């Protein structure tokens, strides 16, 4: 956050996410995690920070993710405590407390990757949001209910970022191949399978604006941010 200043890095986080995050940090500190806080919040793709090779994939680029410090090491009792507190306050840490690389990555959504078809992509440039309010509005459908977030610990799954990227790349290739014509029937069948499985994910209470967001949620849940 030193590259842009804490005020801007926090100010570009989704408003609902900020409230939930503040409540979670307050409760965590009261519970003994005295140094719990945020060390990486909003960051534009141009910074080149993060595990994704395509920084537009990261929820950090849309004010929908933070990295937390002061919660102990992966798998520690402190990490488990933070994940419990965060979930109660509507903050999802989708990789779980045991993930060695992403145990401290948290967001208001179970989605782990923003695919090219997602409307969020249209609201930012490499340097940052073209319109902050529009970026927040496009992010609204990804913000899950507090009740859904409270159940997120049971869905958390450690997954290397390269696997998440692989899913995103495969989805992109499938979409391009399916548009060529009837000689690409296998790709079309794959898209149908994605749509079918995507529907089952909505039962978990994840709201979406488009099929692309649903597709990203299903695939990225199997597999950083």
Image (cartoon, rainbow, N blue to C red):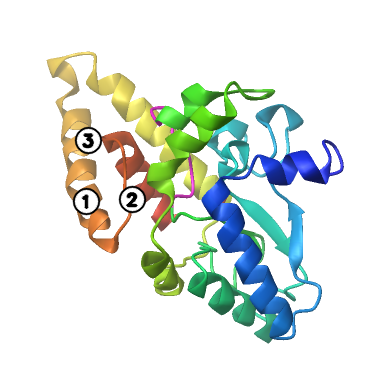
Q: Residue visible at 29% across and 35% down?
A: 210
Look at the image and say whether residue 114 sits in the magenta stretch. yes
Task: Please state if 136 lies on the left or on the right of 205 as rendered.
Answer: right
Q: Give the number of the disc on residue 218.
A: 2
Where does the image place residue 51, in percent across and percent down from the top left?
65, 44
- Labels 2, 3: front one: 2
Q: Main secondary structure of the magenta part?
A: loop
- Which residue is situated farthest in the top direction here? 180
Where does the image place residue 21, in percent across and percent down from the top left?
61, 61
**Residue linked to disc 3:** 191
**Residue linked to disc 1:** 197
Look at the image and say whether residue 51 sits in the magenta stretch. no
Q: In the rendered view, would you say 154 is above or below 169?
A: below
- Label 1 to label 3, Cα distance in Å? 10 Å
Sequence-wise first label, 2 or 1: 1
Q: Residue visible at 62% across and 43% down?
A: 60
At label 3, counting other C-alpha atoms closer than 10 Å, the crowd grade (few under 14, some 14-19, many 20 or more) is some
Quarter of the image for residue 36 reads: bottom right
Contact between marks 2 and 1 (CB within 8 A): the answer is: yes
Where does the image place residue 2, in percent across and percent down from the top left?
87, 43
Read off the magenta span.
111-118
């Amino acid at each position: 956050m030193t590259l842009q200043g804490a005020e801007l890095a926090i100010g570009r986080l989704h408003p609902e996410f900020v409230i939930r995050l503040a409540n979670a940090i307050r409760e965590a500190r009261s519970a003994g995690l005295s140094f719990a806080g945020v060390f990486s919040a909003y960051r534009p793709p141009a910074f080149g920070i993060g595990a994704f090779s395509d920084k537009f994939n990261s929820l950090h680029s849309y004010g929908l993710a933070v990295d937390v410090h002061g919660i102990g090491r992966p798998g520690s009792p402190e990490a488990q405590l933070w994940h419990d507190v965060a979930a109660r306050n509507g903050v999802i840490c989708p990789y779980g407390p045991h993930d060695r690389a992403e145990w401290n990555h948290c967001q208001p959504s179970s989605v782990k990757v923003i695919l090219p078809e997602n409307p969020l992509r249209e609201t930012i440039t490499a340097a940052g949001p073209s319109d902050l309010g529009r970026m927040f509005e496009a992010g609204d459908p990804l913000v899950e209910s507090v009740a859904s977030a409270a159940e997120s610990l049971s869905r958390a799954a450690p997954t290397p970022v390269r696997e998440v990227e692989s899913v995103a790349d495969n989805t992109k290739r499938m979409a391009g191949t399916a548009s060529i014509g009837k000689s690409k029937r296998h790709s079309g069948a794959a898209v149908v399978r994605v749509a079918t499985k995507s529907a089952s994910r909505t039962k978990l209470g994840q709201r979406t604006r488009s099929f692309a967001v649903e597709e990203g949620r299903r695939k990225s849940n199997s597999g950083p941010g």
